Image (cartoon, rainbow, N blue to C red):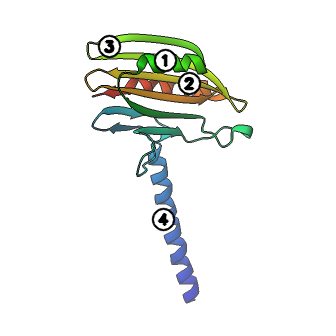
């Protein structure tokens, strides 16, 4: 009889712990505002912002789901922010045009202290096709260039396009 009581208590504890873990995991994929000393960005629903020490990138987010079959180990969508010392917008745009097929490009003078570019391109790597969307912000005041790059597997572009655009639009350099 004692074994049944102890077994019942263990099962109840396991159910409670499992429910809390599932709830925490679901919250990790909710929309979230990430703010640092240099930038603010809105992570959309369905993306995870991993907390690593030390971080691989100043900002990184990736979709909950992976591709299928040959792309089963590749996230359907991911975004990474790279920060470069110096004003490199033109250099980055040139590198993109030399290594990828640019499908859209727009460079604008935001103000005296900054320039911006939006570049969309396609590339193939290991027989896998990607659409790459970039928002590049060149801050003359800070003397830095911020490249927010979102990479999407081609079969999932339509599914993630709105969320990626919202992510790119939300990016602000302080």
In the image, 20 versus 112, the foreground residue is 112
| Classed neighbour count for the residue bearing mark 4: other residues with Cα under 10 Å, few (<14), some (14–19), many (≥20) | few
Estimate the spatial distance between the alpha carbons at disc 1 and disc 2, rounded to whole Å: 13 Å
Estimate the spatial distance between the alpha carbons at disc 3 and disc 2, rounded to whole Å: 22 Å
Residue 17 marker: 4
* Number of the front mark, 2 or 4: 2
Image location of residue 76, percent across then percent down: 60, 35
Q: Which residue is denoted by mark 1 in the rendering?
A: 93
Circles 3 and 4, Cβ within 8 Å, touching? The answer is: no
| Marks 1 and 2, the one that precedes in the sequence | 1
Circles 1 and 2, Cβ within 8 Å, touching? The answer is: no
| Marks 3 and 4, the one that precedes in the sequence | 4
* Number of the front mark, 3 or 4: 3
Tell me which residue sits at (30%, 25%) in the image: 143
Tell me which residue sits at (35%, 38%) in the image: 34
Q: Which residue is denoted by mark 3 in the rendering?
A: 110
Image location of residue 33, percent across then percent down: 35, 37
| Marks 1 and 3, the one that precedes in the sequence | 1
Circles 1 and 3, Cβ within 8 Å, touching? The answer is: no
Kind of element beneath mark 2: strand
Residue 132 marker: 2
Kind of element beneath mark 3: strand
| Marks 2 and 4, the one that precedes in the sequence | 4
Estimate the spatial distance between the alpha carbons at disc 1 and disc 4, rounded to whole Å: 49 Å
């Amino acid at each position: 009889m004692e074994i049944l009581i102890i077994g019942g208590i263990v099962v109840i504890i396991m159910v409670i712990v499992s429910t809390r873990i599932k709830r925490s995991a679901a919250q990790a994929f909710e929309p979230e505002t990430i703010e640092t000393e240099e930038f603010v960005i809105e992570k959309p629903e369905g993306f995870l912002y991993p907390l690593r020490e030390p971080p691989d990138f100043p900002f990184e987010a990736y979709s909950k789901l992976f591709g299928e079959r040959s792309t089963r180990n590749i996230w359907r969508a991911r975004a990474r922010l790279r920060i470069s010392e110096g004003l490199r917008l033109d250099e980055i745009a040139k590198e993109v045009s030399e290594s990828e097929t640019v499908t859209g490009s727009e460079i604008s003078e935001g103000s005296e202290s900054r320039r911006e570019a939006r570049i969309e391109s396609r590339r193939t790597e290991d027989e896998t096709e990607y659409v790459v969307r970039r928002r590049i912000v060149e801050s003359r005041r800070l003397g830095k260039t911020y490249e927010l790059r979102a990479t999407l597997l081609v079969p999932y572009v339509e599914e993630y396009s709105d969320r990626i655009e919202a992510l790119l639009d939300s990016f602000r350099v302080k």
